[in-house]
């Protein structure tokens, strides 16, 4: 089976960009990725477009990719639209690798873009309401919130401003972890402070201000134990990746020294399990498959980007990826193990909490960061000597965990 490489990446700034559209964000990310790869638009043989919110926000319920890409000149090639909640971008990446492995072509594009900010705040926050079984929404929420029972919620720690219902669920995940392992709010705040510090050096990040742990803990509350800086913001943005086979590298005469190998790309859905059976968490199982496919293990990873829709997400997923025993990620974050220069740097980009979370672009934004890290092009946030990297990206909820998990392993 031919090796597959990331040969080009592009990403817009993340944030509130009133002047931008899905089309313009797509154009900017793709143009940068093509330039980075050293290929032309007409060289692309297939495109996979990820978007999760345009139908809800703008009524563009069908063919968003064909519209966004045709507008910038793409014609005749096969295009596929990919919606997999917050894992849409990494799912598009996975499908692009499958296109190449099937030998349907030797150069493919994966691109994601979202325009999520709106003056209609109710519509903006309700975009997440469809990311679980809507026919069982109330029962699902009650079941998930029940996971947080046993932890006292202090008065005044719930916001009276609108926020996504998924923050209540992440808070329940926090309280479950606190109750089971003794994880503290300060340890969760340490993750957030670390990510905001990393983002200072990311010129494309939505937020670039450093916070101390105490700053995070005393920030406006969302829902206990989460405070505002612990939570990913609403974001506009786009990201793109150009992928190529070994034979494509030769045919196009591309720069092999900057090509990053795709060691594994795994998509896995969840299963029914008890909340205590952490070894069967969908991300745990998916990461094991990815490590086996890559011929590597957790100790081989030099840098990681994980899905921190809240700071608690990083704690949970760093344990699922095998970097720490279950219950140990909170203390590890407080020690500095996950900071650049630590044992396993996580989210050097600043993560979703700081970089931003434009849903369809999120997974590809992780690839943008890790590609730069493996090329040694990350400047002040560079992880020294990085040779292997892993990206974890989850989407939606089903039962007591994300509905879909993506694990991508890259190597020099």
Image (spheres, grey):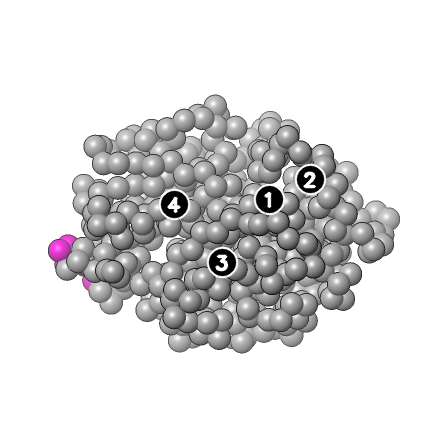
- As measured in the structure, the alpha-carbon distance from the residue carrying label 3 to the one carrying label 1 is 16 Å
Callout 1–callout 2 Cβ contact below 8 Å: yes
Kind of element beneath mark 2: helix
Residue at the spot x=78%, y=45% of the render?
158
Of the numbered discs 3 and 1, the one sitting upstream in the chain is: 3
Residue 7 coordinates in the image, percent (x, y): 27, 57
Is residue 85 visible to the viewer in this orientation of the structure? yes
User: Residue tagged by mark 2?
Assistant: 140
Asked if residue 181 lies left or right of residue 58, the reply is right
Residue 197: x and y, percent? 57, 63
Residue 48 vs 151, above or below: the answer is above
Look at mark 1 in the image and give the residue it sits on. 397
Work out whether mark 1 precedes mark 2 in sequence or the reverse, and give the earlier one.
2
Query: Tag on residue 92?
Result: 4
Determine the CA span between mark 1 and mark 2: 9 Å
Magenta residues span 251-255
Q: Which residue is mark 3?
A: 286
Residue 17 visible at all? no
Mark 2 or mark 4, which is nearer the start of the sequence?
4
Q: Is residue 164 magenta?
A: no
Q: Looking at the picture, tell me which residue is in the foreground, 207 or 393.
A: 393
Sequence order check, earlier mark of 3 and 4:
4
* Residue 171 image point, x, y percent: 71, 50
Q: Position of residue 163 (x, y in %)?
A: 68, 39
Q: CA distance from mark 1 to mark 4?
A: 19 Å
- Give the spatial CA distance, label 4 vs label 2: 28 Å
* Residue in view at x 35 percent, y 46 percent: 95
Neighbours of disc 2 within 10 Å: few (<14), some (14-19), many (20+):
some
Q: Quadrant for residue 22, please give it.
A: top left
């Amino acid at each position: 089976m031919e090796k597959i490489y990331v040969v080009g990446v592009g990403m817009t700034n993340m944030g509130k960009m009133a002047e931008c559209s899905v089309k313009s964000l797509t154009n900017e990310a793709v143009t940068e990725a093509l330039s980075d790869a050293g290929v032309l638009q007409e060289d692309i043989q297939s495109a996979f477009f990820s978007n999760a919110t345009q139908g809800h926000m703008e009524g563009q319920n069908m063919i968003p990719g064909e519209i966004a890409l045709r507008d910038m000149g793409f014609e005749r090639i096969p295009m596929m639209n990919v919606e997999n909640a917050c894992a849409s971008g990494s799912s598009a990446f996975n499908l692009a690798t499958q296109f190449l492995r099937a030998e349907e072509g030797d150069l493919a594009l994966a691109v994601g873009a979202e325009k999520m900010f709106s003056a209609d705040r109710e519509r903006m926050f309700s975009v997440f309401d469809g990311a679980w079984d809507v026919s069982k929404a109330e029962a699902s929420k009650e079941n998930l919130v029940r996971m947080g029972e046993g932890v006292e919620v202090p008065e005044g720690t719930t916001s009276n401003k609108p926020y996504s219902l998924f923050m209540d669920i992440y808070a329940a995940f926090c309280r479950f972890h606190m109750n089971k392992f003794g994880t503290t709010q300060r340890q969760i705040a340490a993750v957030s402070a670390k990510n905001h510090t990393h983002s200072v050096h990311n010129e494309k990040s939505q937020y670039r201000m450093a916070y101390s742990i105490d700053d995070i803990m005393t920030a406006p509350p969302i829902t206990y134990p989460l405070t505002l800086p612990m939570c990913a913001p609403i974001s506009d943005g786009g990201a793109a990746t150009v992928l190529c086979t070994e034979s494509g590298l030769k045919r196009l005469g591309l720069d092999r020294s900057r090509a990053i190998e795709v060691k594994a790309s795994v998509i896995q859905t969840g299963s029914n399990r008890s909340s205590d059976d952490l070894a069967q968490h969908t991300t745990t199982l998916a990461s094991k498959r990815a490590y086996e496919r890559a011929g590597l293990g957790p100790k081989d990873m030099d840098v990681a980007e994980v899905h921190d829709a809240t700071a608690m997400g990083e704690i949970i997923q760093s344990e699922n990826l095998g970097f720490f025993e279950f219950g140990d990620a909170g203390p590890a974050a407080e020690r500095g193990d996950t900071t650049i220069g630590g044992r396993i740097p996580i989210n050097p980009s600043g993560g979703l909490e700081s970089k931003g979370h434009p849903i369809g672009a999120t997974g590809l934004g992780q690839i943008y960061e890790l590609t730069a890290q493996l090329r040694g092009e990350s400047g002040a946030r560079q992880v020294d000597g990085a040779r292997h990297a892993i990206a974890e990206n989850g989407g939606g909820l089903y039962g007591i965990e994300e509905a879909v998990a993506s694990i991508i392993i890259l190597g020099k």
